[in-house]
Image: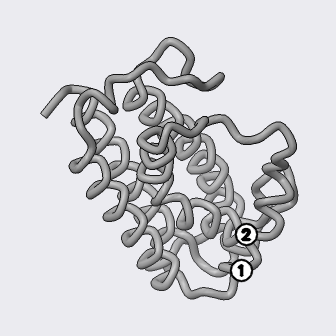
Amino acid sequence: MSASRENLARAVRESAAQIEEMARALDGEALAGGVYENGWNARQLLCHLANGGWFAGFMIGLARAGRSLEPPADFDQDEWNARDVPAHQDKTIEELLAQLRTGTEQSLATIEATPDEVLAQQAEVSWGAGKTLADAITGAIEDHVSTHLAELRSALREGGTTAGQG
């Protein structure tokens, strides 16, 4: 297994584990607290993260199909999130974590099944220019998840207690 493949698989597994750990630490008060610049509370941000387990597999699929990894010029991330997050916010924490696990497993299976030459191809994306596909996806996952986990940690600090602590 190439170093890039190993790093990508590690990033997918570690990000899922970090999200799951954070989800289990957030209590009801912390979940209701506002944490994201667009007005999301911690529960909504957790929905966003739980739905992202499929990201690596999706990006690899685009690359294998010869499609651009950059979103179309008319793509509005905020509009996408405004539609996507409400579709998940009534799920329980366990349901969100199951969704995360399913997406993560799909991404890991895709990573394993992808030829080395695809993972080693140059990424044609602004957020990973000059990197291999595997390294660009790894960096995007690590940056995205660490940013949102920091926001969720702020909900823990402001929310008071965590689950399991009286």
Identity of the residue drawn at 50% across and 69% down? 23
Cβ–Cβ under 8 Å for marks 2 and 1: yes
Where disc 1 sits, the SS reads: helix
Identity of the residue drawn at 78% across and 53% down? 36
Q: In x, y percent, where is residue 55?
A: 50, 52
Residue 38 occupies quadrant: bottom right
Q: Residue 84 shows which numbered tag?
A: 2
Residue 129 occupies quadrant: top right
Where disc 2 sits, the SS reads: helix
Q: Which residue is mark 1?
A: 87
Is 130 above or below relative to 95?
above
Instruction: Classify the position of the N terminus by image quarter.
Output: top left
Query: Crowdedness of circle 2 by 10 Å Cα count: few (<14), some, many (20+)?
Result: some
Identity of the residue drawn at 50% across and 12% down? 130
Is 93 placed left or right of 8 in the picture?
right
Q: Amino acid at mark 2?
A: Asp
Is 7 placed left or right of 42 in the picture?
left
Viewer-proximal residue among 133 and 52: 133
Q: CA distance from mark 2 to mark 1?
A: 5 Å
Viewer-proximal residue among 72 and 34: 72
